[in-house]
Amino acid sequence: MKTTQTKTKVLTANRLTDGISVWLGANGEWTTSLKDAFLARHEDAVAAITAAGDQALADNRVVDVNVIEIEETSSGPRPFRLRERIRADGPTIDYAPASAAQASHAA
Amino acid sequence: MTVIWTQNGIVENDPWVSGAAEDPPKLLPLAEALEHAQDNAAFGVVLQPADDVRKLEPILDRIAIVALPFPVFSDGRGFSQAMLLRQRLGYTGELRAVGTVLLDQVPLMLRTGFDSFEVEHVPTIERLSKNRLPGIDLHYQPAADKAEATLGYSWRRTAILNG
Amino acid sequence: MYRYDEFDHAFVAARVSQFRDQVERRLSGEISEDAFKPLRLMNGVYLQLHAYMLRVAVPYGTLNSRQMRKLAHIARTYDRGYGHFTTRQNIQYNWPALSDVPAILEELAEVEMHSIQTSGNCIRNVTADHFAGAAADEVADPRPYAEILRQWSSVHPEFSYLPRKFKIAVIASGHDRAAIQTHDIGLQLKQDDQGRFGFAVWIGGGQGRTPLLAKKIKDFLPESDLLSYVTAIVRVYNLHGRRDNKYKARIKILVHETGVEELTREIDAEWAHIRDGELKLPEADIAAINAYFTPPELVDRAEGWGELAAWKKSDPGFADWVGRNVAPHRHPDYAMVTISLKPIGGIPGDASADQMDAVARLAEEYGHDEIRVTHEQNLVLPHVALADLEPLYRALLADGLATANAGLITDIIACPGLDYCALANARSIPVAQEISSRFGDPARQAEIGDLKIKISGCINACGHHHVGHIGILGVEKKGTELYQISLGGSGDENASIGQITGRGFGPDEITDAIETVVETYLASRSSADETFIECYRRIGAEPFKAALYNSEAEAA
């Protein structure tokens, strides 16, 4: 007999003032690091984070609030969706400005 | 809380706002308005965004007020309807914006010919009653409002403030 | 180029105050995010995956060195030291704080720039041929008309809440370098047999979920009727465009569903009422705006011919760059220079603040202080003397801006994709980088010749993949990225929408698939002079599909 495993969830949003991606931490504050997010493993916890998200939206602290599913791994929470992994880790490209001394490849 | 606002301030005892629930509606939809025009009393019309305003042409002189709804603020059809009423049909009666009327759209509504506003949004009511509108008084295009052609190009206008 | 007068300065200043007030009301909660969203969009502020994004308008892709320096300064001061030039000739910053945007707009206003209507359901940046004012094949510079449209459309009270975005492009040549057939309104400036100026008018082009090419509805619209006719089109669209479905709301759908003849009848009927009214453009106004676009004084510099020949002989790299990135100017002693923002393996369209400053300096020194942004995410110096090409090249080389690949396979157009964009389903930049690296060898690029690859990370098609010779569309399938290939698209005067080849390719297969397409072309072309698009149009999709999907084993 199998028991259905509900996936662990975290709450994510973007800060209103600067748009930076944030996650709801264990202490109820918003953190810029997914590693520090509060992990909601049960229905009650998910309800609690959802309510916290609604409140933060109403308080004009964040926008675009979403409950997302993560996988608990040894190196921390890992979102299932690629999009959320990119939100957590930043752009997958090295967007640091090209060095001005970089020689171009002539065609 | 619903108020009626014009550039002269909040209107008390607006004749077109229904009082008690059992009062007959004072603003008629298009089809009824076209029938009703036989009677002598001036009446009001409320159109829908998909209505063709030109249908009012034959009965325009009987109409005291036209209300144009903005069901959501992103539905901008009312702006074109207003322009056509003012500029094409030469309608000079009251033109009221109803529905979702928010502060930042009011300056655009004023320019397209609206002169009264039914407002429910509290922060909007507050700003309107202080006459603190967020519009820009320099215009890059003519519209239905009274505005002056300005030195420069033919398409520019400046608002006539205070009158 | 156009210079603000007192009216323009006062307007942008008022606009900045207006937005500052709106931001304050948002931060205080006086207006909700729902109500604020269209307001911030109309000031070019998006919310993306990691941060806000600010899209600054570069009207018809034209700017000067002072403005470019300001863009560099903004990148350094308010962002992370770089910007991204877009497929609509604008620039985007990926990391501004909302609370900083009013200050950024104030700084932009100092140099006559703004972010007005770079997003939202309103009339967007009017784009134009990036070689305008310099190309030999134009009847006249189309940009004065783009400027008139820009002014007229700014905070237009009737057209600020259209069913969807509205994009206009203007050219002045039979060679369409602005992809007008993919625009809501496309305008081609021409002259009648009495030499009077007017426009051929197209409507209903657009990419996205339902790519459609525009239909020509008027052969010659006299220039004085420009504003009244565009008003008639947009008014009919505003009243009748669909509002029930975001993906069916552009004017292209209205054209498709109503029929172009019927819609044109409605437009003409509306136009008849307003044609001779206050929107009629007086000759004096057209002349006054035209005067801002008087070409720079270009002194004869015939010594450039001999010098150029000598430099090319002594430096093959320089010769390659001239061959690819330098195009003939109306004045024989001058040239139009494309500054590639596509370094091999680099991020298409990005420029660092240092690079922006470098371009500004070079525009002043060698380019008569004029810079253009192309819709293919490169920059242009439209007026460079042949005699100055070599020192210009040296300087560009030092700043990583001399990649000699204009129009070649590594001159890839790519949207920001899932690395940045909240709308995306897949990443586009890493795909562009890998393809660029794979084909980076100059000899190989030269062998392949003209080939435009355009990559979009979602169906919104900001990478314009539908009109790529090779288009790549990133989708999401079962939680992973998948890339669909389309072939045979083109955005020039012989416009066409690309055809999907078949099933998509994973991130680790896509570059090989592109290689297969290229190899098929090289094996099938009738001569080295037959370009990819010519070859595709001759042989069709089948040979490419067969190569992509039917061959399982290595050729014996």
Image (spheres, coloured by chain):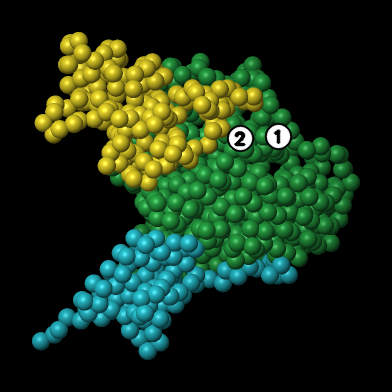
Output the letter for the chain in cyan. A
- B154 versus C122 height, above or below: above
Between C380 and C451, the residue placed more toward the observer is C380
Subunit under mark 1 = C
Tell me which corner region of the image, top left, top right, bottom left or bottom right, holds residue B131: top left
**Chain C drawing hue:** green
User: In which quadrant is the C terminus of chain C drawn?
Assistant: bottom left
Query: Which amino acid is tagged 2?
Result: Glu
Mark 2 nearby-residue class (10 Å; few <14, some 14–19, many ≥20): many
Between C128 and C282, the residue placed more toward the observer is C282
Q: Horizontal placement of B53 versus B21: left or right?
A: right
Disc nearer the start of the sequence (2/1): 2
Disc 1 marks which residue? C293
Query: Which amino acid is tagged 1?
Result: Phe
Asked if disc 2 and disc 1 are in contact, CB closer than 8 Å, the reply is: yes
Q: Residue at x 56, y 22 (%)?
A: B148
Q: Which secondary structure, mark 2?
A: helix
Name of the residue lying farthest toward the bottom = A74
Q: Are marks 2 and 1 on the same chain?
A: yes
Subunit under mark 2 = C
Q: Residue at x 20, y 17 (%)?
A: B34
Disc 2 marks which residue? C147
Residue C371, visible in the rendered structure = no
Q: Residue at x 30, y 45 (%)?
A: C245
Image coordinates of residue C300 in percent, x first then y, are 86, 39
**Chain B drawing hue:** yellow
Q: Distance from label 2 to label 1 (Cα)?
A: 10 Å
Q: Residue at x 75, y 36 (%)?
A: C295
Image coordinates of residue B89 in percent, x first then y, are 36, 16
